[in-house]
Amino acid sequence: MQLPINKKALLSTGIMWLLGGGIMRLSQHYEIGSLQMMGPGFMPYYCGLLILILGCIYLLASYVLPTESDFENVSFCRSRLRGWFFIFLGMSSFVYLGDNFGFLPASFALVFISSLGSTEFKPVSALLLSLIVSLVGAFIFLYLLDLQIPLFTASF
């Protein structure tokens, strides 16, 4: 079985590969460094790498995902507005709670409030997901990356 060639996806992927490869090549003239001590070439190099990877994902997904003609009858509905509203509310609460109460309450609220936007919301699974993401996020950002973010603060 031969897969049909999606010319738009192939052209887009080629442009992404050229762009990402070019960025990575040019960034090698600068010191890249590491996560702890980033050099001036760190961000461009890894952004170029990300563009390369996204190009590969896009090419593979173009054979699996529906085409533009499959979306002709998509309408604007309330459930989409609900998702946008709760995701925005979750991000806003993360900023406020992060400044006033610390990383753990802020990340917990971000995930829980954002999950309210789902049409398949289940409180128990949202609580478990919020707890796990908060703890894993704290471990990654505070202990692995050594960022100076307080876990808990109480400023009113």
Image: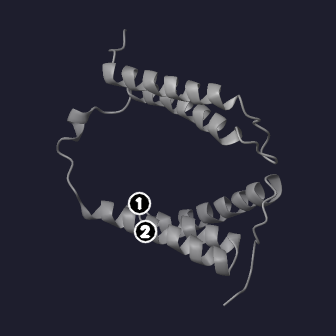
Snapshot quadrant of residue 118: bottom left
- Type of amino acid under label 1: Glu
Look at 44% across and 21% down and name the residue there.
Answer: 14
Give the position of the C terminus as an image quadrant.
bottom right
Tell me which numbered mark, 1 or 2, is placed earlier along the sequence. 2
Say which residue label 1 marks: 120
Identity of the residue furthest to the bottom in this view: 156
Q: Is residue 27 above or below residue 98?
A: above
Say which residue label 2 marks: 86
Residue 59 seen in render: yes
Look at 32% across and 24% down and name the residue there.
Answer: 8
Snapshot quadrant of residue 141: bottom right
Q: Position of residue 77 (x, y in %)?
A: 24, 60
Q: Position of residue 89 (x, y in %)?
A: 46, 72
Q: Secondary structure at mark 1?
A: loop
Identity of the residue furthest to the front in this view: 29
Mark 1 crowd level (few <14, some 14–19, many ≥20, 10 Å Cα): few
Q: Is residue 79 above or below residue 53?
A: below
Give the position of the N terminus as an image quadrant.
top left
- Type of amino acid under label 2: Phe
Q: Is residue 101 left or right of residue 74?
A: right
Q: Is residue 6 above or below residue 24?
A: above
Q: Position of residue 31 (x, y in %)?
A: 77, 35
